[in-house]
Image (cartoon, rainbow, N blue to C red):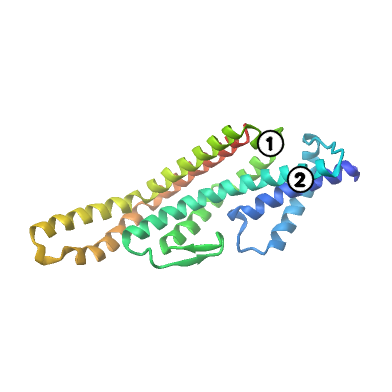
Amino acid sequence: MNLDSAFIIAFCATFVRCSAMMLSSPLYGGATPVQVRVLAAAIISLSLTPVIQPMLDLNPSSLIELALMMGREAMFGLLIGMCMQFLLAAVQMAGAISDMQLGLGSAQLFNPQMGGQTSPLGQFKFWLATVILLLLNAHQMMFQAFMASFKLSGSPMAGSSDFVSAGAGMLGQLLVLSIQIAAPVIAVTVVIDVAAGLINRAVPQTQPFLISVPAKLVLGLLAMSFGLPALVVAIQQGVNITFDGIGRIFGA
């Protein structure tokens, strides 16, 4: 390993891509201080630079080309991190849909990982999904995608139509997955609403909708509890969708 200009440029390119990925990915802690994540990215980049240097085209002839190269590296890192953020956002959306069905949507909590407000079940499923992703070694798969991205030439935006279609396809699959995760709660609340409507037509004096509110809350939480083991399978499917989407976005 020679500490020359080529090594310094390779380290800078690796560091920009790695830091962009770690800063945008919620798996490495949105609540973790930025200084800690940047230092970790610098250490990881320094250790990976000798491996990555032969994969890079290190011939910038001007400062403009060097700036474009660093911008490309930042875009690659942000794409990988944001795709993982979309996966966790889909799981959080499933919890928000469940809260809306159960009448808990008005209760809002702050999620430091995403930097915004979320509902109680959305918060619960977000943290549970984060733990499951770590158990599934999704953080290691991110670095596998990070290393594989250096083998690609050009930019994902080179074929803009393929880039947009791949991103839209991945988001569409994650949205369907979000609805599937919330399906047990949706099914229970729909059945209770239909039953309350039939009772209201038959005996209007009973006011069944006042009874259906606590019934939806109790039975909906039970349905969600029984469906929690299937959440692991759903998140594993979401990981496959996400990394397949990353590959299509990068043109792999």
Front residue of 141 and 216: 216
Q: Position of residue 198 (x, y in %)?
A: 14, 55
Provide the residue designation for mark 2: 70
For disc 1, the neighbor class at 10 Å (few under 14, some 14 to 19, many from 20) is some
> Which residue type does callout 2 highlight?
Met
Can you tell which quarter of the image residue 150 is in? top right
Residue shown at 27%/59% (left/top)? 219
Query: Which of the pair 92/28 is nearer the observer?
Result: 92
The kind of residue tagged 1 is: Ser
User: Relative to 167, is 203 above or below?
Assistant: below
Question: In the drawing, does residue 29 fall left or right of residue 12?
Answer: left
Neighbours of disc 2 within 10 Å: few (<14), some (14-19), many (20+): some
Left or right of residue 27: residue 67: right
Residue in view at x 40 percent, y 68 percent: 107
Question: In what element is the residue under mark 2?
Answer: helix
Image quadrant for the N terminus?
Answer: top right
Residue 142 occupies which quadrant of the picture? top right
What residue lies at 20% left-to-right and 66% top-to-bottom? 211
Circle 1 sits on which residue? 155
Give how far apart the Cα atoms at labels 1 and 2 are.
12 Å
In the foreground, 5 or 50: 5
Q: Position of residue 222 (x, y in %)?
A: 31, 58
Q: Position of residue 85 (x, y in %)?
A: 55, 51
Q: Quadrant of the C terminus?
A: top right
